[in-house]
Amino acid sequence: MKGKAVMVLGTTSGAGKSWLATALCRWYARQGLKVAPFKAQNMSNNARVVPGLRGVPGEIGSAQYFQALAARTVPDVRMNPVLLKPEHDTGSQVIVMGEVRDDLRAIPWRERSEALWPHARQALDELQARHDVVVIEGAGSPAEINLHRNDFVNMRTARHAAAACLLVTDIDRGGAFAHLYGTHQLLPAEERALIRGFVLNRFRGDAALLAPGPDQLSALTGVPTVGVLPMWRGHGLPEEDGVFDDAPSRGTEPGLLRVAVVAYPRLSNLDEFQPLRTAPGVRLTWARHPRDLDGADWVILPGSKHTRADLRWLRTQGLADAVVAHARAGRGVLGVCGGLQMLGKAVCDPDGIEGAPAQAEAGLGLLDVTTTFDRRKQLRTTSASFGGPGELATPWSALAGVSVQGYEIHHGRTALAGAGSRTAAVLHNAAGQALGWAQGPVLGVYLHGLFEDAAAMRALFGQRAPVLDQVMDGLADFVDRHMNPGVLQRLLESR
């Protein structure tokens, strides 16, 4: 016996697949079913550390991590067996079942897909054998005719799982009915038969104006439109792609804490800043130019998939000088992982982890630390504690003595540059290893997830943002209201 599969496909990237799959995970879990998420291959630099094979921690895409939480299950590497982490426009790090596979990096895409499919198929089989429902997320579009033959993420997965498929489109961008019809018609007949419903996402306006479009589309395809989901910007779930293109989280009313996250080209793990978007009294913006830092109270340098290249980008954009000036004016700067490395005196890469070997790339010099990349990748969930009063200056002094939970994903090894430095190690794990350093208003940490930790949020803001479990319930309530009655249950019934 194997569990039922419900799959969310999209007419394009960004149509709303991840969001809808997360909502369905919680909806089915609330029916008392044992649920797991699955995405055969994800391409994202937003990743989380989860239990892996043989007791070794591994990585999966953040979207599947959040979907597992929505499903009320423990995330593991089978839920995203293949993760591609882009390092530049034509190359990605390849992670299979949570582990980096350098041997697969140079294989051409078509051949590599055939080598990866058995790993994905086995993971899917194991999840279906252990769960009542597996909610599967597709990637991009399932009907790219130049890729279809070797695409194992969409319809090959759907066929193998005998999945009941929903096809979602972003109606706010226009062309929704054409996207749905064209995608449906480009699929082979046996794959079209798996499409059980169309979903119009991000709709604004009077739903009555959609007529007669849904009925005409059903007459042409035999597939009903089973849901019209209104535009909902404040749902609280991190967007998987392009978060920094969003509008500021709030207006310009007085009294707001203004936080600017620098959006360099290879930024990673920016989903961890979602709690700042929903925290009362915080205005979160994304910075690509020096003017974007004007008026900011805090500047955050997030993680990076290529620290040295993004450092050079900071200088080219003029942002390096702007960040230094911000710190010297006594205003807060926070660096997370790659951002921490940039804050130091130098970043060394003698083994070429980020490309061509390089002994030293000058950092911003705001912390007296140096970083050297190591071939061994540090992957772990981590408990850590900040030092006591007096070790942290404003605005980070509120974190003194606070214990936090998070995760680490990094090749870098960072240490104080020398004796007599004004920089101090201020964050240590249970083994006493330093994970964070501070000097004046500048703080750099290796720990991801600081703003997802309730204790840290209470210390910094005196109140906590909505917890993720409340967000997941809100998503499930939303689809329950706006999908046709009974349609989600009928997806579990054989045809």
Image: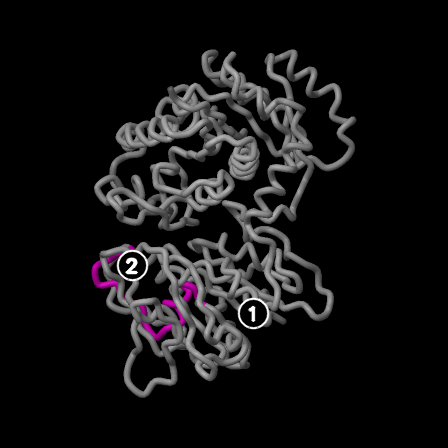
Q: Secondary structure at mark 2?
A: strand
Tell me which amino acid carries mark 1. Leu
Q: Secondary structure at mark 1?
A: helix
Q: Residue furthest bottom?
A: 420
In the displayed structure, 431 sits above or below 274; it is below
Few, some or many residues within 10 Å of mark 1 (<14, 14–19, 20+): some
Tell me which amino acid carries mark 2. His
Q: Quadrant of the N terminus?
A: top left
Q: Is residue 27 magenta?
A: no
Residue 83 rendering spot, x and y as whole percentages: 36, 41
Asked whether disc 2 touches disc 1, contact meaning CB atoms under 8 Å apart, the reply is no
In the picture, measured across the screen, residue 462 lies left or right of residue 371, that is: right
Kindly report which numbered mark, 2 or 1, lies closer to the viewer in this rendering.
1
Which disc is residue 460 wearing? Answer: 1
In the picture, measured across the screen, residue 90 lies left or right of residue 167, that is: left
Q: Residue furthest front?
A: 32
Residue at x-position 47% and y-position 26%: 142
Which disc is residue 411 wearing? Answer: 2
Residue at x-position 32% and y-position 88%: 420
In the displayed structure, 350 sits above or below 388; it is above
Q: Cα distance, mark 2 to mark 1?
A: 29 Å
Residue at x-position 39% and y-position 22%: 2
What segment is highlighted magenta in the picture? 335-354
Tell me where residue 28 sits by quadrant: top right
Residue 246 rendering spot, x and y as whole percentages: 60, 51
Query: Relative to the observer, which residue lies in front, 71 or 20?
Result: 71
Query: Relative to the observer, which residue lies in front, 105 or 118?
Result: 118
